[in-house]
Image (tube, helix red, strand yellow):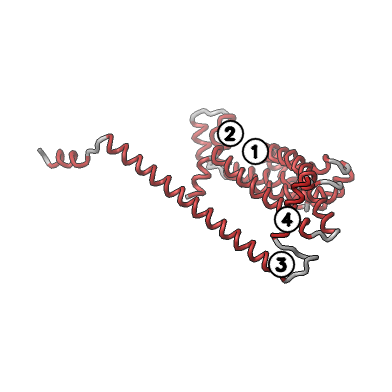
Amino acid sequence: MTAIERARGELAVEPDDVSSEQARAVQVAATRKHRRHLIHFVIRLASLAIALTLWEIAAWNVDPVLFTSPSKVAVAAYHMVLSGELWTYLWPSLVVLAIGFAFAVVLGVAIGLLLARFWVLDVALTVYITFLYSIPSVALVPLIVLWAGFDTTAKVIILFLFAFFPMAINTYQGVKSVDPKLLEVGRAFRCSEGQLWWNIVLPASLPFIVTGLRLALGRGLIGMVLADLYTAISGIGYLIVRTASTYQVDKMFVPIVTLGILGVTLTALLRLAEKYVAPWTAASQED
């Protein structure tokens, strides 16, 4: 037996050995991922406990008319949920959020794609996007109320204005960041414009679009509350103003905390959806 044959024999690996090694590698990776998620959960739980404790201690030294403790907020939340008061004011705001956010996402992604892919539209319309985005949306609220009245339509328009621009701008930047070499390869393989969009442009732009969704969600919640304050005596924003004006501070904090929990929950749902729509971006963030 020659030296080359002996080396080949030493390097040869049975198929069963390869499969077992792969299975062990997958098991080790899953164990590490589970351990990392457990550590993150423990850290968040400890952080929440510390924050609530500090809040409770701080409330002892402040006038109850101006501040309150988390224990009193929890009691107030229990009574407001039990009586149905919280849901009565929260439901109209959720309807406005769903409609306005859906319109902002669809139109924001569509306009961002069109502006980025067609230079004529980019040159003609980008200046208007920048102009409108530079104007504080709050300044347009009185005009919107004057045109659309005080009903749900005005609220949807206000929320749409808050959430639209993050979607359009992030989508635009995502398409602009697509590697030109990928487009050249697609054209070399005679891909149609639709195939370029579906197979190259959209997958490469998804991380930017997902970021736009998160930004639009946060701004949409702000627009939702602002719409309640300016348009009608309904919605969770009005509940905050009503309880504050009557010095019911513990009840005032209930809708505020509810908005925070709503934002955290919707952001978590977006992250979950991202794992199915764009798993490569979620994997890169975990690494």
Mark 2 vs mark 3: in front: 3
Q: Are marks 1 and 2 in contact (CB under 8 Å)?
A: yes
Height in image: 118 above or below 34?
above
Does the rendering let one see residue 192?
Answer: yes
How packed mark 3 is, by other alpha carbons closer than 10 Å (few <14, some 14-19, many 20 or more), is: some
Instruction: Name the residue carrying label 2.
Output: 197
Q: Earlier in the sequence, mark 3 or mark 1?
A: 3
Q: Residue furthest bottom?
A: 61
Q: Earlier in the sequence, mark 4 or mark 3?
A: 3
Please state, as top left, top right, bottom left or bottom right, where the N terminus lies in the image: top left
How packed mark 4 is, by other alpha carbons closer than 10 Å (few <14, some 14-19, many 20 or more), is: few
Q: State the residue at coordinates (35%, 43%).
A: 24
Instruction: Name the residue carrying label 4.
Output: 75
Q: Earlier in the sequence, mark 1 or mark 4?
A: 4
The circle on residue 59 is 3
Give coordinates of residue 177: x percent, y percent: 57, 45
The count of marks equals: 4
* Left or right: 175 as drawn, with respect to 103: left
Q: State the residue at coordinates (73%, 55%).
A: 75
Mark pair 2, 3: CA separation: 55 Å
* Secondary structure type for disc 3: helix
Residue type at mark 3: give it: Ala
* Secondary structure type for disc 2: helix
Does the rendering let one see residue 160?
Answer: no
How packed mark 2 is, by other alpha carbons closer than 10 Å (few <14, some 14-19, many 20 or more), is: some
* Left or right: 154 as drawn, with respect to 212: right
Height in image: 260 above or below 25?
below
* Left or right: 269 as drawn, with respect to 133: left
